Amino acid sequence: MASSDTQAHDGGDVKGPATCVVEAVVACAVMLLGAMVIYGSRELGAGWTSDGPGSGYFPFYIGLIMTISGAGIFYQALFSKKGRNTTVFVDGEQIKRVLSVLVPAGFYVFAVEFIGLYIASFLYIALFMVILGKFSWVKSVIAAFCVNALFFMMFEVWFKVPLYKGRFDMLSFLGY
């Protein structure tokens, strides 16, 4: 059997973090988040008042469940009787594919703050189609425009629910 950071895969060694290590790290993150929820709920008042449960009563127990679950996952990942799962969690090629979607999505979320939902979505759809989907620029721009025009009409015109247009409000010339 391969070591904890390599695994034979299709005739070659693949390097990457072992699944049990990733599970333990995620479990620690869940425990930390649960502890933060517990702390915050105690600040709100996690006890029972004369009117019923305090503001932090239910969040306290949710945080407690998260912390206990995280501890259980941590224990299972590192000290299970069945043995630790030492197979590679993700290899270099797989992480590149995930990041090819995650990084542009991060830029999209950042761009929404400044140029608004419609323009950021137009750019995201068009660039995603061209770069990852290998569609032509013409098809990508048409699809991105049609999707955003449909959402604009649906939200701004028909439902009268304005969506965020960004700090620079580049669509102000439309009157919405």
Image: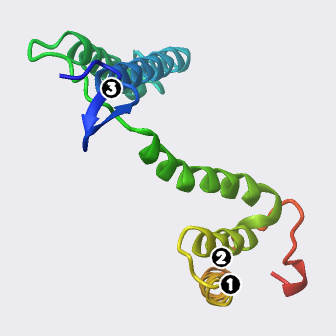
The one of 77 and 164 positioned closer to us in this rendering: 77
The first of marks 1 and 3 along the sequence is 3
Q: Seen in the image, is 25 located left or right of residue 156?
A: left
Above or below: residue 117 compared with residue 50: below
C-alpha distance separating marks 2 and 1: 8 Å
The one of 16 and 173 positioned closer to us in this rendering: 16
Report the mark closest to the observer, 2 or 3.
3
Report the mark closest to the observer, 1 or 3.
3
The first of marks 2 and 3 along the sequence is 3
Dot 3: what SS?
Answer: strand
Residue drawn at x 69%, y 53% as measured from the top left: 107
For disc 3, the marked residue is 6
At which x and y percent is residue 169? 86, 69
Numbered mark located on residue 170 in the image: none
Numbered mark located on residue 126 in the image: 2
Above or below: residue 35 compared with residue 101: above
Q: Are marks 2 and 1 in contact (CB under 8 Å)?
A: yes
Residue drawn at x 60%, y 69% as measured from the top left: 128
Q: Amino acid at mark 2?
A: Ala
Q: Seen in the image, is 143 located left or right of residue 16?
A: right
For disc 1, the marked residue is 137
